[in-house]
Image (cartoon, grey):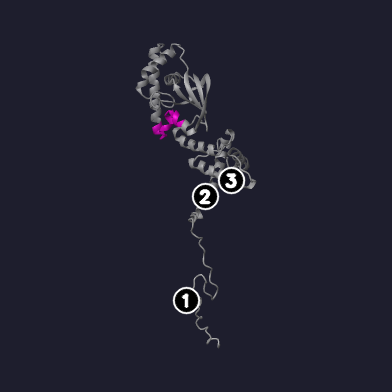
Amino acid sequence: METGFAAADSRDDYARARRNATLARLAARLRMRSGDLDVLLPFDEVVTALGRRGETYLGEQLVDLDAIVGSVDRTTGFDRRFRPTSPQSRVRFERIAAASRRGEVLPPVDLYRIGEVHFVRDGHHRVAVARALGREVVAARVVLVHTAVGAGVGLTLADLPLKGHERLFAERVPLPPALRSRVVLQDPDDYAMLAEGVEAWGFRRDQERGELGDRPTTALAWFTEEYEPVLNALRDAGRAAGSSTGAEAGDEQVGRVVVEVARDVDLLRSARGPARPPRPPGRPPHRRPWPAAAGRPCSRAPTGAGRARSSGRPWPGRGPSAHGR
């Protein structure tokens, strides 16, 4: 309940925000939710996993508060919804809240944008006060950070390893952004397996055509000639039914199918055993002895009789007396 006094109401705003943060943390424990769902995303770890390519200044604009989920240099003091989690931020929070309640114009915050999420570079308390007062947007100076792969609003710390493998896949299979978003996998190792399969497919294709193609051309050819037909076949067969988004479920399913085929090929290679090590230089090639004919000893493995013949002595039982000579 508001009293009309900015100082008193700002203290209530802080106490309510702290209480909501505590209740949210307790509810997460009772529901056995992962703790990283409610923490601020670290900017450096996210850009490392996604692959930083550059940045562009977008100027001042209004940003949805729900899209601000991370920080550049702060990992404690606030949760993912910028509710204060420690008493160190109380004085500054109440001062900014009182100024906002008095109608003072606050300076815009500074944000980095990656995909659909934003990271606070300056203005953590202003974002926290805006959320505590029930506002939906905040004025901000935004810098767009270009990355190899994008990020959605639901990005968490647990998703960063998968995003890192997705970035490596995008570097090895450079598809256009619209097509790359349709290759959806849930296991980080599957991206490496699929990339190896695409590179092997491209090698066979270049051999058949008699010319060497670059990575973007090979990746686009693989998607249109191999991946997309399987995707359409699965959709036509209705194997993606029962999901909330049929297109996304179909992409995930065809990704698993393609990866399973690549894994089967790898298992076949393993079943053949390791390749024979190369022959050391100077050693003659190994030759197997010819098999012995029926009733005749092998010439490459001489018996005692063979040695006798090679020394000039007659075969046993075949001298002149044996033939009546």
Dot 3, crowdedness within 10 Å: few (<14), some or many (≥20)? some
- From the viewer's perspective, is residue 152 above or below residue 95? below
Classify mark 2: helix, strand or loop: helix
Residue 23 or 263: which is nearer the viewer?
A: 263
Residue nearest the viewer, comparing 27 with 299: 299
Q: Which residue is mark 2?
A: 266
Callout 3: SS = helix
Image coordinates of residue 195 in percent, x first then y, are 54, 42
Q: Cα distance, mark 3 to mark 1?
A: 56 Å
Q: Amino acid at mark 3?
A: Phe
Q: Earlier along the polypeptide chain: callout 2 or callout 3?
A: 3
Kind of residue sitting beneath label 1: Gly
Of pointers 3 and 1, the one earlier in the residue sequence: 3
On whether residue 42 falls in the magenta region, the answer is: yes
Residue 83, located in which quarter of the rendered image?
A: top left
Q: Residue at 48% x, 36% y: name it.
A: 164
Which residue lies under the disc numbered 3? Answer: 203
Residue type marked 2: Asp
Dot 1 corresponds to which residue? 304
| SS at mark 1 in the image | helix
